[in-house]
Image (cartoon, rainbow, N blue to C red):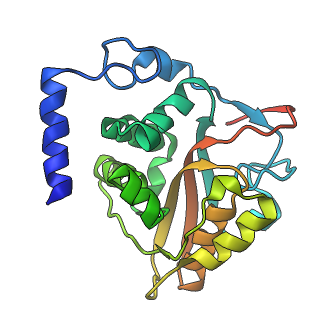
Amino acid sequence: MQNVKNTIIDWLLGLVAPHLCVSCGQNTGVFCERCNSYIEKQSYGVCWCCSRPSGRNLCLRCREVFDGFFVVGVRRGPLKKLIGALKFQSVRAASFPLAYLLYRRLPSELWTLAIVPVPTSTAHVRRRGYDHMLLIGRRLARLIGCSLHQAVLTRATHTQHSLGRRSRQVAAERAYYCPRPTPDSYIVIDDIVTTGATMLAVGRALRQAGARSVYGAVVAKQPSRLGAPYLLK
């Protein structure tokens, strides 16, 4: 009931005081076309999931989990601000353009698959007042016309961004699980991928529960510190 009330309040506020673009501040909606055109497609010569050196968008290790992996852009500039608005500034309306960006990135042949949002920790949901990935997942499922499954649950109590690569991997493997068999095919979605620990852990949980195929899709790839450019195709 609280989520419904919040949605109605957001809608009413949007009528009275339309959202400014979270990136440039223009009165053109929560994310304007101009800022959308500035989303950076450049990143680094690594696996799109785990950031290890790879001549393909998925390294051999990540291809054991994912049948395909899709990234909207690099976590810089307008895209970074858009994600931050939803996660840290309570701009729920930012979930709409984020879902649309994922929708535009996913090939149409995958639109029959179920969406699985990476589960957000209880502490983060409590602090924000909502599950930001569930919001994005619901918007994306409506755009595509597919189902949304909360097939993976979390035991996580840690904060991923405070951990190193190895610690992220260990924590993530312990954090996610499927409570029941899941024999269907899925697209796992998340907002940001850095080391890929979370995405891989969720993907493995689905595989272990019997998933036929698993794809990954994220809004933003955290820039590598190495600085060698490659092109997101």
Return the residue found at the far top: 26
Residue sitting at x 87%, y 37% = 226
Query: Where 170 sits versus 121, above or below?
Result: below
Q: Left or right: where does residue 65 sit relative to residue 88?
A: right
Residue sitting at x 33%, y 54% = 130
The answer to whether residue 84 of the structure is visible from this angle is yes
Where residue 126 sits: x, y (%)?
Answer: 37, 59
Q: Quadrant of the N terminus?
A: bottom left
The answer to whether residue 66 of the structure is visible from this angle is no
Q: Left or right: where does residue 37 sit relative to residue 229?
A: left
Q: Compare residues 90 and 56 and report the one nearer the observer.
A: 90
Where residue 52 sits: x, y (%)?
Answer: 84, 53
Q: Compare residues 205 and 23 and report the one nearer the observer.
A: 23
How many marks on residues?
0
Residue sitting at x 34%, y 36% = 91
Where residue 204 sits: x, y (%)?
Answer: 63, 75
Q: Quadrant of the C terminus?
A: top right
Query: Where 225 sits versus 171, above or below?
Result: above
Q: Compare residues 2 and 217 and report the one nearer the observer.
A: 2
Q: Compare residues 192 and 165 and report the one nearer the observer.
A: 165
Asked which quadrant contains residue 137, the reply is bottom left
Residue sitting at x 59%, y 24% = 77
Where residue 102 sits: x, y (%)?
Answer: 47, 43
Query: Where 219 sits versus 34, above or below?
Result: below
Query: Where 126 sits versus 16, above or below?
Result: below
